[in-house]
């Protein structure tokens, strides 16, 4: 058990739970942990940047005004399921075992919610978790199987799969509010996870947001046409460019009449043969055609005329500079449209907390499973240790404790979340968790020995988007990355970025002699971190 808890743990465990649950309830805060998928800090108003004038997230911004914004929050492995396994276990991927989206997650292992529950908390998880199998440590759980669907989503609970009608972000919120209002034991403190599918690919806003950005120009990033001139092979061979890898149909929603006919025939066949429609998963037509006729009409009415004009320009045009710019606008309008419902629903939760008075003793946390490229370097998706995918948003409101409108610039990482929750709950923190509680930071008191560097490791190669395996170390000043393994020239390839002078990471300075001393120091630090985190 980590030091600061020894005395309290003697009280809690040694004296046989002398504290009643009610006493605990009054002294420890509730936790509402709102989480999203692939929500970049670039697309949050409170983080500033080029999208801020569009006012994409008024409610998340409200949370930031009332709480603390973390400007240097990072992940240990920028991909969904490994990141979530880290959140639950407080460990890097190599220790919890979920190194990529494909390998199974061992639910039997230690997880923070199991400890919270043993220490008097009610725990609930609603939404996307992306860890196959039955959840453990929750009094109540309803999760999306796999990636989940935006329209008519399926859910999984103790009893199995079932389909709901409507839009996923609204449904997750409704389920969470229902549990908050009538599903829990009101004598106990609670930890409620409201984890959204938005804003994951393929981006489908709710019908009410289809036209939200219709006549709005979305500012482009300066690096939209990056040619990766100074980088090694990995950036050149990754397959996540707006130009080549956004699918005209599923991503850009440019459907040919032939696709629509094929879909109508398949739908008819499913219905005629008595199958469920929409199906529970694994369907060629996927996301768009899960919509009801009414929902799809709203989309088609808003977009079809324009879509046909774009299709008439031909596939070649979609690969030109102008075509890429069009792709960027379409992608971002849909991405921000998904965020609009996310933000609205966060507002709903904040309102309910305020109306019920629960807000006063509830810590509200907003974060995402990793960052995301919004056209920076010509990309969508994540995976790389470069800033936009390595960094993730984190905003925490703790009434009476966090200074409203404050900004923290310490290096924090998703390995810290589990310990933070346990610390908030005054529960024991196991020694083998690898992060640090953020509670002192939330109080505005960063310990003198706070970390100065971060460890990162991405493993999913070969895999979708073909981002090669890499590990690395980052400080606030610079970043060193080692690509390695299959398909990497000579077995390993290094990159070095000076973050102070080159925040967009456009100049890999690994072979520049003046960087040698810093590279040497960073290599040493990488060796130290590998040891410290038991990665060797
Ligand atoms: C899907 C997406 C990818 C995405 C992975 C992993 N393609 O395969 O773009 O990188 O999920 O995402 S899609 O066409 O099916 O949407 S993750 O968030 O689960 O890690
Ligand atoms: Ca994700």
Image (cartoon, helix red, strand yellow):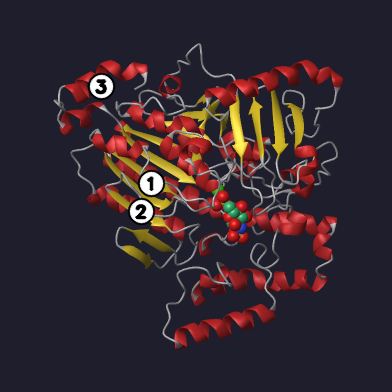
Q: Position of residue 160 (x, y in %)?
A: 33, 63
Q: Position of residue 105 (x, y in %)?
A: 45, 48
Residue 483 vs residue 506, the one in the foreground = 483
Residues under labels 3 and 2: Cα distance?
Answer: 30 Å
Residue 329 against residue 353 in the figure, above or below: below
Residue 73 vs residue 480, the one in the foreground = 480
Horizontal side of residue 469 vs 2, given as left or right: right
Q: Quadrant of residue 330?
A: bottom right
Q: Earlier in the sequence, mark 1 or mark 3?
A: 3
Dot 1 and dot 3 residues touching (CB under 8 Å)? no
**For the residue labelled by badge 1, is the local secondary structure a helix, a strand or a loop?**
loop
Q: Earlier in the sequence, mark 2 or mark 1?
A: 1
Horizontal side of residue 133 vs 123, given as left or right: right
Q: Point out the frontmost of discs 1 and 3.
A: 1
Q: Position of residue 288 (x, y in %)?
A: 57, 69
Q: Position of residue 174 (x, y in %)?
A: 36, 55
Tell me the residue that label 3 is attached to.
9
Q: Quadrant of residue 507?
A: top right
Residue furthest out toward the top:
448
Q: Earlier in the sequence, mark 3 or mark 2?
A: 3
Dot 2 and dot 1 residues touching (CB under 8 Å)? yes
Residue 402 vs residue 137, the one in the foreground = 137
Q: Residues within 10 Å of mark 2 (few under 14, many from 20)?
A: few
Tell me the residue that label 2 is attached to.
134
- Tell me the residue at 40%/40% (across/down): 33
Image quarter in which the N terminus is found: top left
Tell me the residue that label 1 is attached to.
107
**For the residue labelled by badge 3, is the local secondary structure a helix, a strand or a loop?**
helix
Horizontal side of residue 509 vs 247, given as left or right: right
- Tell me the residue at 71%/66% (across/down): 248
- Tell me the residue at 54%/71% (across/down): 283
């Amino acid at each position: 058990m980590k030091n600061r808890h020894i005395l309290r743990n003697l009280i809690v465990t040694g004296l046989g739970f002398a504290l009643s649950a009610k006493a605990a309830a009054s002294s420890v805060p509730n936790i509402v942990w709102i989480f999203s998928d692939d929500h970049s800090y670039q697309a949050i108003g409170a983080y500033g940047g080029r999208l801020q004038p569009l006012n994409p997230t008024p409610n998340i911004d409200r949370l930031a005004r009332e709480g603390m914004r973390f400007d240097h929050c990072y992940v240990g492995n920028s991909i969904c399921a490994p990141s979530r396994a880290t959140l639950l276990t407080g460990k890097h991927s190599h220790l919890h075992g979920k190194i990529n989206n494909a390998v199974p997650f061992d639910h039997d292992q230690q997880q923070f919610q199991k400890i919270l529950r043993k220490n008097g908390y009610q725990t609930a998880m609603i939404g996307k978790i992306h860890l196959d199998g039955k959840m453990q440590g929750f009094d109540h759980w309803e999760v999306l199987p796999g990636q989940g669907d935006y329209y008519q989503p399926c859910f999984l609970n103790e009893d199995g799969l079932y389909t709901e009608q409507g839009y996923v972000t609204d449904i997750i919120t409704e389920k969470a509010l229902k549990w908050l209002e009538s599903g829990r034991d009101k004598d106990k403190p609670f930890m409620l996870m409201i984890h959204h599918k938005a804003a994951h690919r393929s981006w489908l806003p709710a019908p009410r947001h289809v036209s939200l950005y219709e006549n709005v120009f979305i500012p482009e990033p300066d690096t939209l046409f990056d040619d990766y001139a100074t980088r090694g092979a990995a950036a050149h061979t990754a397959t996540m460019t707006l130009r080549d890898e956004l699918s005209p149909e599923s991503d850009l929603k440019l459907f040919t009449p032939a696709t629509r006919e094929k879909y109508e025939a398949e739908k008819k066949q499913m219905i005629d043969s008595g199958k469920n429609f929409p199906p529970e998963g694994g369907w060629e037509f996927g996301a768009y055609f899960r919509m009801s006729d009414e929902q799809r009409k709203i989309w088609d009415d808003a977009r079809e005329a324009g879509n046909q004009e774009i299709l008439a320009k031909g596939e070649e045009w979609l690969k030109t500079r102008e075509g890429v710019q069009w792709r960027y606008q379409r992608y971002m309008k849909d991405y921000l449209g998904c965020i609009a419902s996310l933000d609205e629903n966060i507002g709903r939760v904040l309102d309910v907390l305020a109306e019920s008075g629960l807000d006063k003793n509830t810590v509200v946390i907003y974060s995402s499973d990793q960052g995301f490229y919004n056209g920076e370097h010509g990309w969508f998706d994540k995976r790389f240790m470069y800033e936009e995918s390595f960094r993730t948003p984190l905003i925490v409101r703790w009434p009476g404790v966090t200074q409203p409108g404050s900004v923290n610039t310490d290096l924090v990482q998703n390995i810290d979340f589990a310990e933070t929750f346990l610390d908030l709950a005054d529960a024991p923190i196991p020694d083998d968790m690898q992060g640090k509680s953020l509670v002192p930071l939330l109080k505005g008191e960063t310990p003198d020995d706070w970390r100065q560097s971060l460890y990162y490791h991405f493993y999913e190669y070969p895999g979708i988007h073909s981002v090669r395996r890499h590990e690395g170390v980052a400080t606030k000043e610079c970043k060193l990355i080692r690509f390695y393994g299959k398909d990497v020239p000579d077995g390993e390839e290094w990159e070095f970025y000076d973050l102070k002078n080159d925040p967009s990471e456009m100049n890999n300075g690994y072979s520049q002699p003046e960087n040698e001393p810093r590279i040497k120091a960073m290599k040493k630090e990488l060796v130290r971190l590998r040891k410290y985190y038991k990665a060797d």
